[in-house]
Image (cartoon, rainbow, N blue to C red):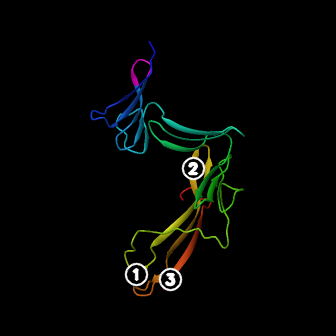
Amino acid sequence: ANWYRITSTATDGLADEHIWYTGSSAERMRIASDGKIGIGTNNPQAELHISGAPTPEIRLTDTTNSVEANFFANDTVGTIGSKSNHPFVFNTNNTEAMRIASDGKVGIGTSSPDELLHIEGDQPTYKLTSTNPLATAVGTETIADIDFEGQYNNLYRTTARIRARQDGTWSTGTANFAPTALDFFTQDNETSD
């Protein structure tokens, strides 16, 4: 028979853990003695800990326009995003910082991205930082590359590259004295390239 029960593990008259059961005596939820809530687990490790298989999920739905946001995990990946055909927005300090539009375009500084990545602002900067220490202050070592890749017949190829590199002796004492150069590479019509 189906039945419902709430029990406490207290033995001294004080609440220790509260456990909710439904159906055939299956535990459904627990509030541990430290206030953590477990659903699908009897040992919650966070303020709200949901455990299960195949895909435990938290879903929020605004019924005005059927907007759905969810957070779930499955066997290989954790996912957060919008389940409905609506943009997904990241806020910091109660202000929009980044948006993924419903068509997959990403906007930083704009709520209407026109391209796959659209960055908008007062003199916006896109920054690449190499954490690889240069072997010598004198040389032409690569600092960073931007590659352009194309696909034909399911074969992907790097078709062009812009490379930032050393171009002389870098100062060991002056941070801003670091001679550099930009190299531009493209493919020609030679099959050996």
Up-down: is 106 above or below 15?
below
Q: For residue 88, which numbered disc appears in the image?
A: none
Quarter of the image that includes the C terminus:
bottom right
Q: Earlier in the sequence, mark 1 or mark 2?
A: 1
Q: Which residue is mark 2?
A: 156
Q: Main secondary structure of the magenta part?
A: loop
Which amino acid, mark 1? Ala
Question: Alpha-carbon distance for marks 1 and 2?
Answer: 36 Å
Residue 171 placed where, x, y %?
A: 43, 86
Residue 162 placed where, x, y %?
A: 57, 67
Instruction: Give the crowd class for mark 2: few <14, some 14-19, many >=20 residues within 10 Å.
Output: few
Write down the quadrant of residue 185 in the picture.
bottom right
Up-down: is 62 above or below 142?
above
Q: Is residue 136 left or right of residue 192?
A: left
Q: Earlier in the sequence, mark 2 or mark 3?
A: 2
Instruction: Determine whether the residue tagged by mark 1 lies in a helix, strand or loop.
Output: loop
Mark 2 or mark 3, whichever is nearer to me = 3
Residue 55 placed where, x, y %?
A: 48, 33
The residue segment tinted magenta is: 22-26
Tell me, yes or no, if residue 149 can be seen here: no
What residue is at 52 percent from the left and 43 percent from the top? 79
Choose between 37 and 70: the one closer to the eye: 37
Q: For residue 137, which numbered disc appears in the image?
A: 1
Instruction: Give the crowd class for mark 1: few <14, some 14-19, many >=20 residues within 10 Å.
Output: some
What residue is at 67 percent from the left and 50 percent from the top? 101
What residue is at 53 percent from the left and 57 percent from the top? 192
Q: For residue 179, which numbered disc appears in the image?
A: 3
Q: Is residue 5 left or right of residue 116?
A: left
Q: Is residue 50 left or right of residue 113?
A: left
Instruction: Determine whether the residue tagged by mark 2 lies in a helix, strand or loop.
Output: strand
Choose between 18 and 152: the one closer to the eye: 18
